[in-house]
Image: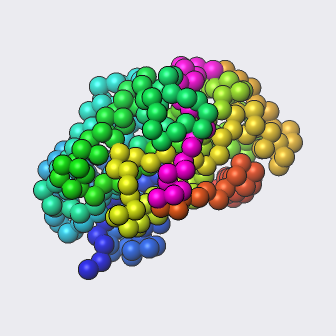
Amino acid sequence: MSTRILIIGACGQIGSELTFKLREIYGDDNVVASDISYNNLEVVNSGIFEIIDAMDYASVKVCVEKYNIDTVYLMAAMLSATGEKYPMKAWDLNTSSLFHVLNLAKSKFIKKVFWPSSIAVFGPSTPKKETPQYTTMEPTTVYGITKQVGERWCEYYNQKYGVDVRGIRYPGIISWKTLPGGGTTDYAVEIYHEAVKNKAYECFLSEDTALPMLFMDDAIKATVDIMTADNDDIKIRSSYNLAGITFTPKEIAASIQKYIPDFKITYKPDFRQEIADSWPQSIDDTTARKDWNWKHDFDLDAITKEMLMQLGEKYNI
Ligand code: AKB
C-alpha cells in the first residue's frame, strides 16, 4: 500500500519545499498539502490542496479520513519572534495542533507523525557550544517552551501508546523559495534578498551573534531521512539535535562580499537579540549521525553561492 501524506502548514518556509519534495518522491496524488489560507499559490497549484485549521481537531480528522492519510507532517507553528508578541496564541497553536495529530495517531487514524522541534528548546543555562543532545533545557521564549513541552508529549505518546512520532530540532533554515516568517534566525534569509536587491542590509542582531543554521536542501534531506529510517533506528522520540553550520552576521556578510564586494551591512539589534543570546551557538548532532546517518552537505560559501544565484534569477538582476 502506498504512503498517503498530509502536510499541515504547507504554505510556510519549510512546509512548501517539503511539499514539493514529497510530491516528487511519493507522487502528486499521494501528498495532500494544507494550510489555514491560500497564501502560497505555487503550493496551492502544485497538487491537492485543502484549507485546514490546525487548531481544529475536526478539520484535521475530516481531511485525514477523506484522503485515507497515514502520515502527517505537522509544519504549522508560530515562531520565536512572533510568539513573544502573541504568547497565548503561540501556546494555543503550537500545542493544540500537536495534540490533535498525536491523538489521531493514538486512535489509529494515522500511523506516523513528523513534528519539528527547534534549537529554541535550549535556554541561557544550556552549554552554548556543541550543545549536547541531553543537557539543561530552560527555554525563555514562549516558542521554546511550546517546543520543549511538545517534545515531552511526543515521547510520552510513543512510550505509552506506541505512536510512531519522529522529530528534529531545526536550527535556522536558509532558503530562497518561500520567506520565513516571525523567527529570530530570519535575518540569515533577509540578508540575501537585500544583498541582491539593494546591496545593503540592516541586521537586527549584533555582528558577533553566532547561531546554528542549515540550508533548506539539507533540512529537507534530514526530514525525509528520519521519516524513512527503520523504526528501530529511531531511538529518540522527543527530538534529535541536528547541526549544519554556525556563523555570525559578520561572517555571512563577508561571504556575500566575495560575490558582491560593495555589499554593506549595518547593525541595529532589537528584541530578537535577547532571544538569539539565549540559544546555542553550535550543536552536537552525534546521535542523529549515529542513529540514522545524518550528514549535512552545504557550508556557508556554498549556501551564499546558491542563494545569490537563485535570488538573482528571481529578481531578474
Ligand atoms: C526561529 O528563529 O524562531 C526558528 C527556529 C530556530 O526554530 N527559525
Within the magenta stretch, is there residue 285?
yes
Foreground: 226 or 84? Answer: 226
Name the spot of residue 49 as percent of width and height, x first.
32, 62
Foreground: 137 or 246? Answer: 137
User: What residue occupies the far bottom of the structure in this picture?
Assistant: 1
Name the spot of residue 81 as percent of width and height, x first.
47, 28
Residue at the (34%, 68%) spot, across then down: 31
The picture quadrant where one finds residue 149 is top left
Residue at the (66%, 20%) spot, across then down: 268
* Image quadrant where one finds the N terminus: bottom left
Name the spot of residue 314 as percent of width and height, x first.
65, 56
Tell me where the magenta segment starts and ends, as one range.
269-291
Name the spot of residue 235 as percent of width and height, x first.
38, 55
Relative to 198, is 19 on the left or the right? Answer: left
Foreground: 315 or 125? Answer: 125
Residue at the (41%, 66%) spot, across then down: 229
- Count the numbered circles shown: 0
Residue at the (43%, 34%) spot, across then down: 121
Residue 81 can be seen in this image: no
User: What residue occupies the far right of the structure in this picture?
Assistant: 261
Relative to 311, is 283 on the left or the right? Answer: left
Residue 311 lies, with reference to residue 4, above or below; the image says above
Residue 209 can be seen in this image: yes
Within the magenta stretch, is there residue 267?
no
The color scheme shown is rainbow
Relative to 42, is 142 on the left or the right? Answer: left
